[in-house]
Amino acid sequence: MSHVLYFSPENRLGKAVSTPGGKHVETAIADAEALVMLAAGECVERIDQALAQVYRLSEHAKPQTGVLYKTAREVAGLAGTCGLADLGAAAFSYCNLLDQAEQTGRLSGERVQVHLSVMRLLRRPERFTDAERQEILADLKAVVDKGQADLAKVLPARV
Amino acid sequence: MEKPAINLPAKDLLKAKARINLERASVLLIDNSWGAELLAGIFAGFGSKQLYRCSSMASANEIVRQHSIDLIVSEAMLDEEDVYDFIRALRLTSDNDMNRFTPVILLSAHTVSRKVAEARDCGANLFVAKPISPKVLMERIRWVAGAKRKYLETQSYAGPDRRFHDDGPPQGMVGRRRGDANEDQAAAGAAA
């Protein structure tokens, strides 16, 4: 049984945020959303730069998966903020694929190409209906799930 | 990374007429990506006036040594620098307790498998999945500000109590803490 020390510290944040003044929660959220909207154009530019880097790095015969992962992760973290949530989902899926590759030491060129194609498609979401975009993402998920199943076969054998 | 299995008491957290005053709260933002601009914008919109921004662990360490910080919001993966180590060190600091219990919200677009356990055990208060939205971030800030969780320190963990409910240990198992209910009490609790 572990020895546990308990502390009940003063909640400074709680005290600070409840002092008189400040904003209504609704106003604070609206103000923040307005500032995010102002930055949307710059955000899309940043995504396009990151995407260009993802495409370039991915074309290498042996991509630097660390840098690639970091860049895909940036797309995943930003895209949903500026109306490109499905692109963000595809980038997140690519992060999963690269994470699998780090564990197995193998990166399937075909799976990489599928992700690149999907990210190119979803960069222009207006060309598809919601249903079509969801179908594309479901197919992408199936590709990564297959990789996960392969990984499960490999990893126990290494233990 | 999977979303944490936490049922946040969302009731009242986003009540439109509730007020929040972040003007006097000192907030440290740690991020080295372009997303840091968005994050700073969101806090500016919330009314924050005491924002410390940094993009490296060295700067973050310097700030927490010199200033009393009420909230830390950090990107979970900063290149090669380890945010989890930073939080662990913060929670165990004994020579300078100023920020030992400062709530930490980690932001992450994706967590690599080898880091999931570290992320869970580092002592952060909450994880928020990117892309961040002002609404979600506000909800989490208000939740952390209103939380009455104790902090605890064991041989392997220091940070906020990760137990959100105390229903005793699972049936057939012995509790891991001295104050845990025994098996019979747990069974009675489960039956109640």
Image: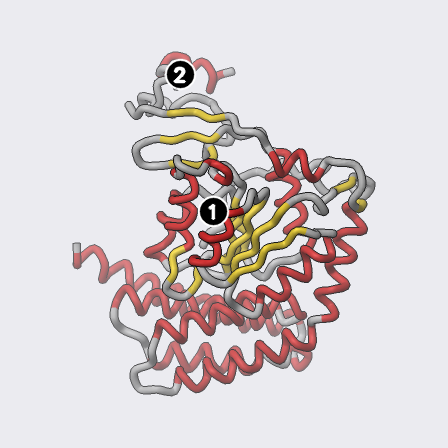
Residue kind at label 1, given as amino acid type? Arg
The residue where tag 2 is placed is: B181
Question: Alpha carbon of mark 2 to alpha carbon of mark 1: how far?
Answer: 39 Å
Q: Could you tell me residue A120's position as x and y percent?
A: 54, 82
Note whether residue A122 is visible: no
Which residue appears at 59% of the width and 42% of the height? B70
The residue where tag 1 is placed is: B65
Residue kind at label 2, given as amino acid type? Ala
Note whether residue A68 is visible: yes
Few, some or many C-alpha atoms within 10 Å of disc 2 (few <14, some 14-19, many ≥20)?
some
- The way the protein has been coloured in the rendering is secondary structure
Q: Nearer the viewer, residue B159 or A13?
A: A13
Q: Is residue B92 above or below residue A30?
A: above
Which residue appears at 45% of the width and 35% of the height? B162
Q: Nearer the viewer, residue A145 or A44?
A: A44
The answer for which chain carries disc 2 is B
Q: Could you tell me residue B80's position as x and y percent?
A: 37, 64
B22 left or right of A142 in image: right
Q: Of discs 2 and 1, which sits in the foreground?
A: 1
Secondary-structure class at tag 2: loop
Which residue appears at 36% of the width and 65% of the height? A99
**Image quarter of the C terminus of chain A:** bottom left
